[in-house]
Amino acid sequence: MPRPFRFGVNLLASAPADEWRAKCRRAEELGYDVILVPDHLGMVAPFPALVAAAQATERPRLGTFVLNAGFWNPALLAREVATTDALTGGRLELGLGTGYVQAEHEAAGLPYGSPRERVDHLERTVAELGRLLGSAEHEPRPAQSRVPVLIGANGDRMLRLTAAHADIAAFTGARPGRTPGTLDPLGAEELDERVARYRALAADRATPAELNLLVQAVAVTDDPEPVLGPLLERRPDLTLDQVLALPLVLVGPLEEVVAKARAQRERFGFSYLTVLEPFMEAFAPVMQRLRAESA
């Protein structure tokens, strides 16, 4: 049996306290299971934003999507994780990644390093978080006995790390782009290969991880071209039909979008779908239909 769907929204825009609480409550009203925040300069600070989200809501889980490990010292991060989990009543899900925007590291006065060095640092961070948060002597203590870990991955080494440690394996459906700080989408066949590689690495797991996909464009419409214009401009080598077929695009009439999400769960195993804040309202009818079909 396929895993039941779960849905998250990644809130990108900072806002005054009342507006922040209102949009968190709106995400809960629409039925999102997880309220998420990213870790980029110029956006909200992750942990205080999640504590505020917890105060405004009752049901959704709360997560980072994803922390830039290069910004964090593992011991200080363990303190943040434990405190946030305690203050949110055990609702935290910890998303981790290497970070891919060199300019942000430079602005923060932090080393960016090579891809190998960034993965090395993430690997050390995961190990140290496990050691510290797993110790009965560590203070403060999280509310959960284990804070679920999500790792965003694409390359072989990252997939190996994800297979070994992550409760949630997150696939961006993209790779670092030709322009620094951007991402280029993966086609379905490329994503097939990446998911198959992950499954091979995770074959010995006692408990299979939940598989997540970050959806980059959502619209229920009979006229998809205006919605996808920005992506078509960035990728002039792709036709409209090729963009519509990308796994990270859910654009089209409602029945077609619902069918595509369902088919991608069957093909890739993506039962946990995350959308970006600009698409929070547009995705709601898709989410409601998928949930109703699973009931």
Image (cartoon, rainbow, N blue to C red):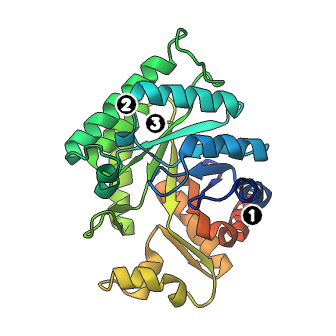
Q: Which of 276 and 101 is in front in this view?
A: 101
Question: Residue drawn 56% across and 15% down?
Answer: 139
Three-letter residue code for mark 3: Ala
Local packing at callout 3 (Cα closer than 10 Å; few below 14, some 14-19, many 20+) is many
Callouts 1 and 3 close, C-beta under 8 Å? no
Local packing at callout 1 (Cα closer than 10 Å; few below 14, some 14-19, many 20+) is some
Quadrant of residue 70 within the rendered picture = top left
Residue 97: image tag: none
Three-letter residue code for mark 1: Gln
Q: Name the residue under label 2.
A: 125
Residue 253 in the image, given as x and y percentages of width and height: 64, 82
Q: Which of 295 and 141 is in front in this view?
A: 141
Q: Which of marks 2 and 1 is nearer the N terminus?
A: 2
Q: Mark 1 points at which residue?
A: 288
Q: Earlier in the sequence, mark 1 or mark 3?
A: 3
The mark total stands at 3
Question: Residue drawn 51% across and 89% down?
Answer: 225
Q: Which of marks 2 and 3 is nearer the N terminus?
A: 2
Residue 24 in the image, given as x and y percentages of width and height: 72, 54
Q: Nearer the viewer, residue 189 or 49?
A: 49
Q: Name the residue under label 3.
A: 166
